[in-house]
Structures are given as C-alpha cells and as structure tokens.
Image (cartoon, grey):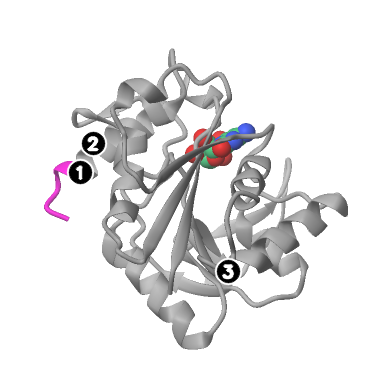
C-alpha cells in the first residue's frame, strides 16, 4: 500500500535530564532521531514522512536530515496532539495507510516494520508492534491487590499502523470525548475497531531515562 509515516518528535524529554530533547542526543555518531527515521526511509512504500517538531525547535536544522519525502509540521502539547496535527496534513486518498513511529525509538528494525505491514494487510486492519510482558505483574499502590495474569499482557511499541482516515477520525473523536490517549491504538480501541498485536523484537526500546542511552548503544554494537 501507499503509506505516510508520522514521527512525533516534539517532546522535551524531561526524564532524560539532558541539555536538549532526547531525540537530539547522539548515539554512535548520529542523533536518535536519525536512527529512528532511517528504517522508514528505507521502505519504498513510504511516500511521505511527516515530522512533528516543536515550532521553535533549534536543533533540527543541525542534523542535516534532508529528503524530498520529509515534511516538517508543528507538534502539539502532548504526543497525541503532535500526531493529530501531522495526520491533518496527510491526503488519505494518496496514502491510505499511516505508520506512526516515536522519534525516541532508534532501534526499530526494518524487518519488524515490514512484518507489521504484511500482517495487517493480511487481516485487512491496523495493528501495532508489541512484546509480551516477561515479569510477574502486580496491581496495587502500597500493597499488592492481586497478581495480574501476564499471559495476555503486552508492551505496546511503535510503529503502529492504521488506515489514515480511520486513525484521524478516531483520535479526533476520542480527544473530544476526553479520553486519555497515549498511543494510536488507544484511540482505535476506544472506537471498538480491531488492533492486531504483532510480536516485534524487545530491544526496540523507547529512550526515556539516561541509562536507556547506554543500553541502546550496547544493542547497536551487537550483531543484530
Ligand atoms: O515522552 P515520550 O517518551 O512519551 O514521547 C514519545 C514521543 O512523542 C517522542 O518521540 C516525543 O518527541 C514525542 N512527543 C511529541 N509531542 C509532545 C510530546 C512528545 O511529538 N508534545
């Protein structure tokens, strides 16, 4: 299918305690943003990449990222607002499908993205990359209320892949209804539309805290 990619990259990355947003920290000589975008660029089906940046972002121009498929758009207050703003720029007739991928996930593999697309095309609806939870899961605040059955628990990763018009519509309606949306799938689920779980590699981590950068560097050095 013809696909647009959306890369929300307008966050400030407070938990990283760094001097700049985490997507601009360097990993093996390149910014995290460049690592995260690269596998999307490699896919011929991806016709346009909409990069949501803070309107006063002073770092992007220094990355040297230029490509005729790259379109810069303004980010919003929360991740979901950044994604929605990018979606509003997309012509859903030209690219009926959209891949949304966090700028802070530099380790995603091209093969996982291709698997996600293939599996979704086979069932005819959207889906997400995910990995099964490994630890025993507890619910509670001070004391454990109970152990949650982890058989059916997954970590939601990105990319997430959906029909462009459906995703735009579901996010718009879910936001209007006051629903908290932390990933694209939450808006689709809210509208009772199906979301396929596609198991991806668990090293597709989101850079969040300082130690994640070291872990990502380690994974990159492995012959993955
Ligand atoms: O902060 P968090 O790790 O959840 O951010 C996930 C992704 O969403 C990051 O790539 C970040 O730059 C992006 N984001 C955004 N607009 C915001 C907040 C986060 O594009 N307002």
Q: Where is residue 213 in the image (x, y as percent from the top left)?
A: 33, 32
Q: Which label sits on residue 217? A: 2
Image quadrant assignment for residue 145? bottom right
| Image spot of residue 135 (x, y percent) | 48, 58
Circle 1 is placed at which residue position? 220
Determine if residue 190 is in view.
yes
Q: Which of marks 1 and 3 is nearer the N terminus?
A: 3
Q: In which quarter of the image is the C terminus?
A: bottom left
Any part of residue 135 in sight: no
Say if mark 1 contacts mark 2, CB within 8 Å.
Answer: yes
Query: Rounded to the nearest whole Å, what is the CA distance between mark 2 and mark 3?
Result: 39 Å
Q: In this view, does 39 lie above or below 148?
A: above
Which residue is identified by label 3? 93
Q: Write the residue at 71% across / 51% down.
A: 181
Mark 2 and 3 residues: CB-CB less than 8 Å, in contact?
A: no
Q: Magenta segment, principal secondary structure?
A: loop
Q: How many marks?
A: 3
Which residue is nearer to you in this view: 101 or 157?
101
Q: Distance between the residues labelled 1 and 2?
A: 5 Å
Q: Does the magenta stretch include residue 24?
A: no
Residue at the image point whose x is 19% and y is 31% from the top: 28
Mark nearest the camera among 1 and 3 is: 3
Classed neighbour count for the residue bearing mark 1: other residues with Cα under 10 Å, few (<14), some (14–19), many (≥20): some
In the rendering, at what x and y percent does residue 105 appear? 40, 45
């Amino acid at each position: 299918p013809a696909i647009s990619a959306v890369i929300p990259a307008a966050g400030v990355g407070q938990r990283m305690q760094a001097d700049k947003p985490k997507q601009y920290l360097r990993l093996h000589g390149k910014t995290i943003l460049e690592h995260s975008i690269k596998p999307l660029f490699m896919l011929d089906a991806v016709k346009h990449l909409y990069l949501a940046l803070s309107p006063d972002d002073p770092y992007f121009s220094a990355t040297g990222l230029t490509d005729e498929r790259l379109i810069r758009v303004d980010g919003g207050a929360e991740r979901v607002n950044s994604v929605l703003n990018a979606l509003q720029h997309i012509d859903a007739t030209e690219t009926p499908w959209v891949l949304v991928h966090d700028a802070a996930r530099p380790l995603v593999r091209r093969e996982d993205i291709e698997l996600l697309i293939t599996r979704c095309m086979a069932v005819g609806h959207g889906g997400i990359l995910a990995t099964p939870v490994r630890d025993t899961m507890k619910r509670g605040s001070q004391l454990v209320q109970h152990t949650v059955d982890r058989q059916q628990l997954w970590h939601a990763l990105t990319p997430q892949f959906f029909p462009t018009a459906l995703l735009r519509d579901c996010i718009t309606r879910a936001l209007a209804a006051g629903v908290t949306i932390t990933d694209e799938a939450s808006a689709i689920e809210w509208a009772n539309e199906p979301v396929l779980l596609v198991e991806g590699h668990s090293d597709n981590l989101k850079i969040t805290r300082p130690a994640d950068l070291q872990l990502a560097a380690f994974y990159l050095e492995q012959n993955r």
